[in-house]
Amino acid sequence: MSQSPQFPPLLSGEVVSRHTDPFDKAVSSAIAGVDSGTIFYSETGDTLRAALVLAPETPLDEAIQVVYVAQIGLAESLGALAPPEVPVFFQWPDRIKVNGALCGGVRFAADVSDPKAHPNWLVIGIHVPFRSAGNEPGVNPDETCLQEEGCADITPMALLESWSKHTLLWLTYFMDDGFKRIHNDWRPRCDTLGKEIEYPRPGLFVGLDDKGRMLLRQDVMTETLSLIEFAEHV
């Protein structure tokens, strides 16, 4: 049996059964009133799946910016544990890329969808594949796993521990300094910024506004896309 991960102060862990999705368990537990700061996680070795329950004190359009915090926490965790030559980038709104290929991402849900409403809870989930789902390496060149990228020595529980610590640190920065610091760190980690994209919608990805919304230019028009549109509402 693998050693239980050690979480930093203010966060606690609860392991779920092998066939339970930690994200679904986190959502149901949040509805039932579980403590903020609880991380639900699975001990399966092929993929790290974990979800953090939070109790925001701000409207949803501000609270949802924590998604960027979780992404930065994951990127910094991989940066600390993976070989130094392994680059980690983001693809808005929810994907993680390792060496230019998709390698997991984030999920998020709240009990409200109105940007100005105050959520009772917000759940941020991560999933990172450690081993291939069965295909031979290179069959899907746009997708990868950590084992194929020279990260075979990393274990899911070590990455979970590291993610919890880095995410808590960046949550502190977010609460103290607001979104600006998060934005400044997230921006250079997004390799589609300033480029024509197809996902989630076609257009030129101009950047993020001060609320963390995507600025997407199509011809002469620029529209904003909010992370809220991609949340898994209950």
Image (cartoon, rainbow, N blue to C red):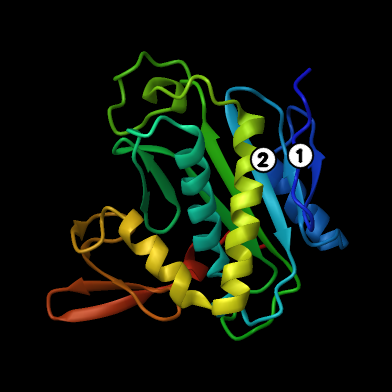
Q: Is residue 33 left or right of residue 83?
A: right
Q: Is residue 80 left or right of residue 225?
A: right
Quarter of image, res 200: bottom left
User: What residue is drawn where x is 41% and y is 81%?
Assistant: 210
Q: Could you tell me the amino acid type at mark 1?
A: Gln
Q: Which residue is mark 1?
A: 6
Q: Is residue 27 above or below residue 142?
A: below
Q: Is residue 154 above or below residue 99?
A: above
Q: Is residue 177 left or right of residue 119?
A: left
Which of these two is toward me, 111 or 48? 48
In the rendered image, residue 150, in percent from the top left (x then y), is placed at 40, 22
In the rendered image, residue 169, in percent from the top left (x then y), is placed at 62, 59
In the rendered image, residue 82, in percent from the top left (x then y), is placed at 45, 32
User: What residue is drawn where x is 67% and y is 31%?
Assistant: 157
Judge the density around disc 2: few (<14), some (14-19), many (≥20) Cα neighbours within 10 Å.
some
Q: Is residue 149 left or right of residue 5?
A: left
Q: Which residue is mark 2?
A: 161
Marks 2 and 1, how far apart at CA: 6 Å
Quarter of image, res 57: bottom right
Which of these two is toward me, 87 or 40? 87
Task: Determine whether the residue tagged by mark 2 lies in a helix, strand or loop.
Answer: helix
User: What residue is drawn where x is 41% and y is 70%?
Assistant: 183
- Let me know if residue 59 appears in the view: yes
In the rendered image, residue 111, in percent from the top left (x then y), is placed at 70, 69
Q: Could you tell me the amino acid type at mark 2?
A: Glu
Question: Which mark sits nearer the N-terminus, 2 or 1?
Answer: 1
Quarter of image, res 190: bottom left
